[in-house]
Amino acid sequence: MAYETAPPGWWQRFVVELPARTAKLAVVRRDGSPHVAPVWIDLDGDDVIFMTSADTIKGKAILRDPRVSLCLDDERPPFSFVTIAGDAVTSTDPAELLHWGTRIAARYMGADRAAEYGRRNAVPPEMVVRVKPRTVVAKVDIAD
């Protein structure tokens, strides 16, 4: 995995810090055109985890071609961002769906609503998507 510019461990802290940022997921549609959509994420080591329906544009694209890119940014001066390019692996295991659905929901909706969202999202055609990074570009305090 390649890294750029940021101190070791910085990009992982940036990705999981609260309040949670949405990641912008980029995939390629069947016709070759780009598609970008926001996703709620969490980390498992260096792997980025999110969930989506297999029936969405992003879900269908990932099942067809597992190469994806993600971008997270801090829009406040002095501005920072992380881009992650990697390969996605999917799972429809019910236990994984519930685990990751609940954990991700806690980050974005709070602990009091995590179980509700976890149960809601732990059903077909939802799938857990694990992005294994190939390249991470992290730029810190760009405007300084």
Image: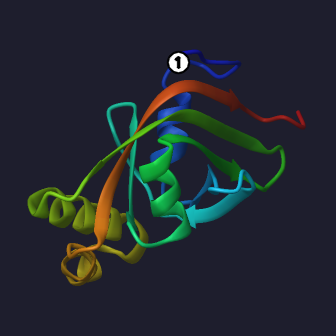
Where residue 42 sits: x, y (%)?
Answer: 39, 51
User: Which percent across, then down, holds residue 124?
Assistant: 23, 74
Residue 19 visible in rendering: no
Q: Is residue 16 left or right of residue 140?
A: left
Local secondary structure at mark 1: loop
Please say which color scheme the image uses: rainbow
**Can you say whether 83 is above or below 124 in the image?**
above
Note whether 1 is above or below 38 in the view shown: above
Please state which amino acid type lies under the numbered disc 1.
Pro
Residue 108 x %, y %:
42, 70
Q: How many marks?
A: 1
Q: Is 55 displayed left or right of 104 in the figure?
A: right
Q: Is residue 3 visible?
A: yes
- In the rendered image, residue 98, in percent from the top left (x then y), is placed at 16, 66
Q: Residue at x 58, y 34 (%)?
A: 85
Q: Residue at x 49, y 71 (%)?
A: 56
Residue that carries the numbered disc 1 in the rendered image:
8
Is residue 11 placed above or below 32 in the rendered structure? above
Compare residues 27 and 72 and report the one nearer the observer: 27
Q: Quadrant of residue 104?
A: bottom left
Q: Going 79% across and 45% down the picture, which residue do you hit?
A: 79
Q: Residue at x 84, y 50 (%)?
A: 77
**As displayed, is residue 116 above or below residue 105?**
below
Image-quadrant location for residue 82: top right
- Asked if residue 6 lies left or right of residue 1, the reply is right
Q: Is residue 94 left or right of residue 44?
A: left
Disc 1 packing (10 Å; few <14; some 14–19; many ≥20): few
